[in-house]
Image (tube, grey):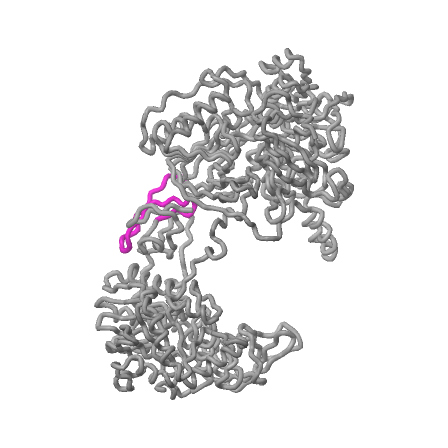
Amino acid sequence: MLLIPCPYCGKRDEHEFTYAREGHIARPTNGEQLTDAEWAQYLFMRKNPKGVHYERWMHAKGCRRYFNVARDTVTHEIYAVYEMGQPAPVIERENGR
Amino acid sequence: MTQVNRLPHGGRVDSSKPLRFVFDGRPYEGYQGDTLASALLANGVVLVGRSFKYHRPRGILSAGAEEPNALIQLGQGNRSEPNLRATQIELYEGLVAESQNRWPSLTTDVGAVNSLFHRIFPSGFYYKTFMWPKTFWMKYEHFIRRMAGLGKCPTEPDPDRYDKLHAHADALIVGAGPAGLAAALAAGRAGARVILVDEQQEMGGSLLSDRQAVIDGVSAAQWVANALAELRAMPEVTLLPRTVAFGYYDHNLVSLMERVTDHLPPTSPEALNQPRQRLWRVRAKDVILATGAIERPMVYIDNDRPGCMLASAAQTYVNRYGAAPGKRAVIMTNNDTAYQVALDLVDAGVSVAAIVDARENAEGELVATARARGIEVLGNHAITRVGGKLAVREVEVRRLTGDGKSVSSDGRTITCDMVLSSGGWQPTVHLFSQARGKLKWNQDILAFVPDKLLPGQNNHSVGAARGAFALTDCLVDGFAAGTAAAHAAGHTEPAGSTPVAGAEPAHSPMREMWVMPSGKPLGHDGKHFVDYQNDVTAADVALAHREGYRSVEHLKRYTTMGMATDQGKTSNINALALMADLRGVAIPEVGTTTFRPPYTPVTIGAFAGIDKGDFLDPIRKTPLHSWHEQHGAPFETVGQWHRAWYYPKPGETMHDAVNREVKAVRTSVGIVDASTLGKIDIQGPDAAWFLNMVYTNAWSKLEPGRCRYGLMLGEDGMVMDDGVTSRIAENHFHMTTTTGGAARVMAWLEDWLQCEWTDKKVYLTSVTEQWAVIGISGPMSRKLLSEVAPDLPLDDQSFPHLSFRDGVVAGVKCRIFRITFTGEATYELNMAPSYAMHVWRALMQAGEKYGITPYGTEAMHVLRAEKGFIIVGQETDGTTTPQDLGMDWIVSKQKPDFLGKRSLQRSDTKRPDRKHLIGLLTEDPNEVLPEGAQIVAELKDKPPMEMIGHVTSSYYSPNCGRSIAMALVKNGRNRMGETLYMPYDGKVVKAKVTEPKFYDPEGARING
């Protein structure tokens, strides 16, 4: 059970939150011009990294705001939380992790 | 019965408080402070159970959570609980316990014939019988399942209450032995918020069984009492005895189970006035693991005979409970700790026939002391036979030869009634390992110890839990960890100095000895048990190795070792070491199995807590709920809402009531409570733009005062919700959603505004519960409304279909929408919930002369199905496009973009032969198809047949005078007029494909 630092409310238990999806996937504004394969890339294809994952969470039972989380999928360490619209921070990790 | 093995002196039980209890139907007496195990031993009861597979007679092995043998069915009736460890059951007045896995009795158990057939029950026998021959398994299974049982589940609901609690702590300290108490003192004195838990009824851990130790100049028992008194006085310290920390999860979340009343007679007022157990979830800044260590039994032949016990357990029974496990002990060891046990036994008046020490040169301070006390020490010896079946009678010992792999040919028999063994100590690393910490092997103590912590977890293993067994190490470790945890949390008040232990004897090295040779091949003339609970022997480990199951995970699954209630607490290391030996590799190369929660079994009731029955999920009721109740309506659950289903009159069946309600709406007027509709208030200068993006149709030109039906798609082009949205003002809309979809739609809309279209000014507010909704529908609805809202012009020019007006109805300000879900002229009256009952009653009164008929969700469904209106989630299933539903008319071709638009152009969504929504008319007009019925076009004698779709909605329609159904069918729109088949219930129903509109297809009735 993660302890997630909501940027607006502070540290709260995971059960207050809803996982939204992978972050930093912009909706194409030119969908009509994209091939089916390109559109499928946006619609279906998601990263599944071992390590840092940039993802969105929503504080569903709190402020109901969406925000970004950089989380380690192996250790569940949360390296950063940041507001929507901000760029993904570069996470420097120790060797061997 | 007299307590034949109760010692005259010593122990912490209160002999002034005798307690009566019943075991296997016989009455006994114990004392306050006893466990069931100690009370049984005090009464001379050594046979307490039968083993799982072979039904071997078994006695008590341990004095704690690790107990594999003494599994008990406790209590009676619906309070009966199986598989409890006798070593953890606190005695109370009137306790009733039964042994398990035996029939008809412990001493005469017919299942013991399994022992004779052990050659057909080898390890992996499940897998082998599954493989060959197939038919054999079916016959076999019945027999095996019955014989290889543990306890019995009660069949009635659990009558007890359970509770849950969340807590935070600077330091959660697990284990209240010397290390844990020292940690609590240091952290508590510094001012930290501390939770100290211990799974036993009394705090003190190993110190409660220790008659030698001295701390800060007083006896261990006195020091424990002083420490607990000091801790109790600290306001920020919470002491939780009878509480097991059973699970360690991410980010330092630890789950505890507190046994609040398990030590009380279950029906005593004190027990009934409290929850039986309490589940704690503690988020701790630091977790101090002072969980101690568990002794390993030695693996000698027939080491499971009743009377075979862990050496430390015997010490605990004698010192702490004043109960002797027997009269005369033989002790088998490879280390020094068993010598103190021997000395304590002799001090208590229990005779020790010999110490059989596997070490070639058993020397050192403790060995010398034992010899000096007249105890015979047989160095470099092994036990090669255990005599006695229902209880140990004697042992044979022989000299070890050949590097400990064999024994001398001549033996010596020693009379005894207990064999106490110590194979060394394994630190209790379960929680550390659950927290995903890495273990490393320590060859000095022959045990796994904590190594690296997982980043993001913060815990410290102290004392025996990290392999530092000396009392002084426990105290120093614990005090330092407690101080550090307090400091890290910002608490720095002076904490005094570290408690000081008195002198302890130095310990000599252990001998690595994993299986005791008996002079015969393993498995011959007796069994070397490794895992008592699962009846896994050293020969089984060798068999697994021979058959190629050599990794620890394979070994575990093939032999089932390490499973069930004890999770291999006494067996895992022995099994690993045996496998390592067979493979010729070092123990860490075999690895360890994964430690998973729970540490000991947890009652399901504790997980459920109060979240059961009416508290399982919130129940949402409309402001008109009580009226529906008074008028006999059963309720249908829609999401969390309870909606009136139908209103039966006396003598009516559901079918009668629904038919009457449906007919009334078509002929006069019906009234429905639609308050549960999801409602979202949408405001802002970009609101119209936003609706254009989230709905498939166009919204810019909708005039204020007008309403429009909208279909909402996921970005994959699939229908996700629908509803009517009205324009209140230029920048203000009122959206309705399906009852069940309201929360999902709200989150979906918020998602896009917060994550993608962050520059748009649109503001959403859920107003579902701010508006009650009463629908009146039918040809008389306008007339009825005109009577209760005399000031409101209702003609089709002033108030046309798909518009709304604000007006006063029965004296109440309402917003009235003219929209329909029945196809009849309909007015949906929205008002403040507190006035809903008044308006409803006024409409009922005024409508009486028209025969106004309240209708429920069932009639509503029939009415909409007659019209072919869809219900999202019934006609759709997340793979349904608007085109599939024949609703292409609502998908804008002009709008440059909306959610789902691009996906509707994907090759798969454009396919002309997708599943389409069609109507079905059965050949027999009275046959109502079951919803979900599979549809085939080509009927065959028996399956498999190609299934081309399924029935989504199906009702009897009194207005059509026949059954009607809708279905999603492959290429359905191109099958109009075809006959399709629905085989079910041993028959085949034929139906003709039609348009999914059954009544008033032209929509002529919309204006009444």
Q: Is residue B776 magenta?
A: no
> Residue B114 sits in which quadrant?
top right
Asked whether the viewer can see residue A50, the reply is yes
Position of residue B945 measured from the top left corner of the image (x, y, whole percent): 61, 74
Q: Nearer the viewer, residue B979 or B865?
A: B865
Asked whether the viewer can see residue B50, the reply is no
Q: Nearer the viewer, residue B328 or B505?
A: B328
Residue B865 in the figure: left or right of residue B525 = left
Position of residue B425 measured from the top left corner of the image (x, y, whole percent): 57, 28
State the residue at coordinates (77%, 23%). Answer: B409
Magenta segment: A70-97
Position of residue B125 measured from the top left corner of the image (x, y, whole percent): 70, 47
Residue B266 in the figure: left or right of residue B309 = left
> Residue B821 sits in which quadrant?
bottom left
State the residue at coordinates (25%, 68%). Answer: B687
> Residue B1007 sits in which quadrant?
bottom left
